[in-house]
Image (tube, rainbow, N blue to C red):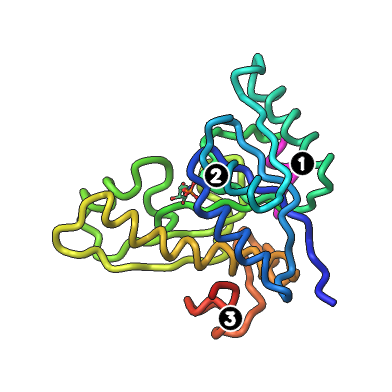
């Protein structure tokens, strides 16, 4: 029987990466189960999808807290209340404080729409086009106090095509995000990722980390 690690997914908007994780979790052999989708915005579109999928949802608005530490503490309590042992940030648009990041060290991961360490932060697609890179992509990484700096678990690259706009490039990359995020969570949930010397070492045959993701139809 597959042992399923309990996961909380934090979103702020559309939630398409969360949806990719939910679809992966529907597979009988997938080693994780989403026990909570938590948003800092009540109007996050992804919440409806999660509710319809029968997943517990919570909204904790950062606006209801005087500072980041108390907002983080409320989220941390909610994540624990649902029994999650892993956290996936999926388009969660609030910076987290060091306290919660260290509390979840090597158990909290994020997806970022660039080939890290290039283009940390916002507006990655605009900046990639401006820089004239010929490959762009996405990365799943452990979360560290410095934004978008943690050990990289998985990446996918796509070509930058003539005539690309930030939107067309974003769409091409998003398809890959939906492949590598479920793959990275699988590796983490199966205990096949460890951090050594600040780098993530992935214990997986090459085929497992190819873009042919067995967790998606
Ligand atoms: C994705 O591009 C993700 O890489 C970034 O924010 C976006 C969220 O999209 N962190 P979605 O909410 O998962 O659709």
The one of 130 and 92 positioned closer to us in this rendering: 92
Q: Which mark is residue 100?
A: none
Q: Earlier in the sequence, mark 2 or mark 1?
A: 2
Residue sitting nearer the eye, 88 or 17? 17
Mark 3 element type: helix
- Give the labeled residue for mark 1: 79
Whether 160 is among the magenta residues is: no
Q: Earlier in the sequence, mark 3 or mark 2?
A: 2
Task: State the CA–CA distance, disc 3 to disc 2.
Answer: 28 Å
Vertical order, 41 against 149 (above or below): above
Q: Mark 3 or mark 1, which is nearer the start of the sequence? A: 1
Q: For the magenta stretch, what is the residue range?
A: 100-106
Which residue is the site of mark 3? 208
Mark 2 or mark 1, which is nearer to you?
2
Mark 3: C-beta under 8 Å from nearest atom of ligand 1: no
Q: Write down the residue under mark 2.
A: 46
């Amino acid at each position: 029987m597959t042992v399923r690690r309990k996961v909380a997914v934090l979103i702020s908007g559309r939630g398409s990466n969360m949806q990719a994780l939910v679809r992966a979790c529907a597979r009988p052999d997938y080693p994780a189960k989403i026990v909570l989708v938590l948003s800092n915005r009540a109007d996050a579109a992804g919440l409806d999808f999660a509710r319809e999928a029968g997943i517990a949802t919570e909204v904790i608005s950062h606006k209801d807290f005087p500072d980041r530490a108390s907002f983080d503490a409320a989220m941390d309590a909610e994540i624990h209340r649902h029994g999650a042992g892993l956290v996936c940030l999926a388009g969660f648009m609030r910076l987290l404080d060091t306290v919660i990041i260290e509390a979840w060290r090597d158990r909290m991961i994020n997806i970022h729409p660039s080939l890290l360490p290039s283009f940390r932060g916002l507006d990655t697609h605009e900046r990639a086009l401006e820089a004239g890179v010929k490959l762009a992509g996405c990365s799943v990484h452990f979360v560290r106090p410095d934004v978008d700096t943690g050990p990289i678990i998985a990446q996918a690259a796509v070509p930058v095509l003539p005539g690309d706009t930030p939107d067309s490039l974003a769409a091409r990359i998003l398809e890959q995000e939906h492949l590598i995020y479920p793959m990275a969570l699988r590796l983490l949930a199966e205990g096949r990722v460890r951090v050594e010397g600040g780098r993530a070492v992935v214990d997986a045959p090459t085929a497992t980390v190819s873009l042919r993701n067995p967790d998606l139809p």
